[in-house]
Image (tube, rainbow, N blue to C red):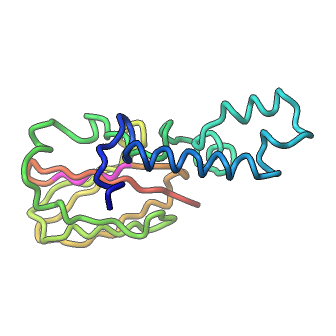
Amino acid sequence: MGLLAEDNLAGKSVGKTISEMLKVQFEKLRDGDFYYYQNDPYLTKNVKDRIQKSSLSDLLIRNTKILTFQSNVFFSEPCPEEVLGTTSARSKESVIAEAILFPNPVSKMLQVDLGHHSNGGTINISSADGKKIISFIINSNQQFMDLDVSELKEGLYILTISENDQIKSIKFSKLD
C-alpha cells in the first residue's frame, strides 16, 4: 500500500519506487529475450536504428488499413475546438454525459444511446483532424439513433453530440 501512496514523478502515473521496479523488470525482460531486436545478431545496424525510431502509431499505420493516428496512442489528445465548440459550452453540467456508442469499433451501423429523451439537436462526425464529414439531426423525444457509417473509410473519428448548448465528443474507430 505504501508504494501507491508515493507522490507521482513528473510526467508519470507512479512514484519513484514503482517506477524503478518497473524499469528494472522490463530491462531484464528485454535483455533476456533472444528475439528482442537489439539482441538479434542478424539485423544490420541500419535496421535496428529504423526500429528504434519507430513508434507504436507507426507500427499500427504500417500494419493496418487505418491511415491516421495521434502520435502517442497511449494518451487521448483533446478534441480540436471546432469539433468541441466553445469552452463555455463544454464547462456546463451536461445531461448528455450518459451518451454511449456501440459497437466500437464499427463497420456498418453505429448505434447511439443518448442516455435520455432528447429535446432535439445534432450529431456531427468528424475525422481525427477535426474536419466535419457528416451530420445527423436528433429529433425531439429521441433517445436511440442508428447511424449508417458504412461509407466512411477506415480510421479514427470523433462523434460530437450537440444539444441545448451542451456538447459531448466520443472517439470511435471505423473498420471495413
Among the 4 quarters of the image, the one containing residue 102: bottom left
- Position in image of residue 118 (x %, y %): 12, 66
Quadrant for the C terminus, please: bottom right
Q: Which residues are magenta?
A: 158-162
Q: Does residue 89 show up magenta in the picture?
A: no
Residue at position x 51%, y 42% from top? 69
99 displayed left or right of 170: left
44 displayed left or right of 58: right
Residue at position x 12%, y 51% from top? 166
43 displayed left or right of 168: right
Residue at position x 36%, y 38% from top? 9
Quadrant for the N terminus, please: bottom left
Taking depth in this image into account, of 36 and 16 the one nearest to the observer is 16
Number of marks present in the image shown? 0
80 displayed left or right of 162: right
Residue lying farthest right? 42
Query: What secondary structure prevails in the magenta region?
Result: strand
Taking depth in this image into account, of 91 and 138 the one nearest to the observer is 91
Residue at position x 14%, y 36% from top? 87
- Position in image of residue 82 (x %, y %): 27, 35
Residue lying farthest front? 2
- Position in image of residue 121 (x %, y %): 16, 56
- Position in image of residue 152 (x %, y %): 49, 53
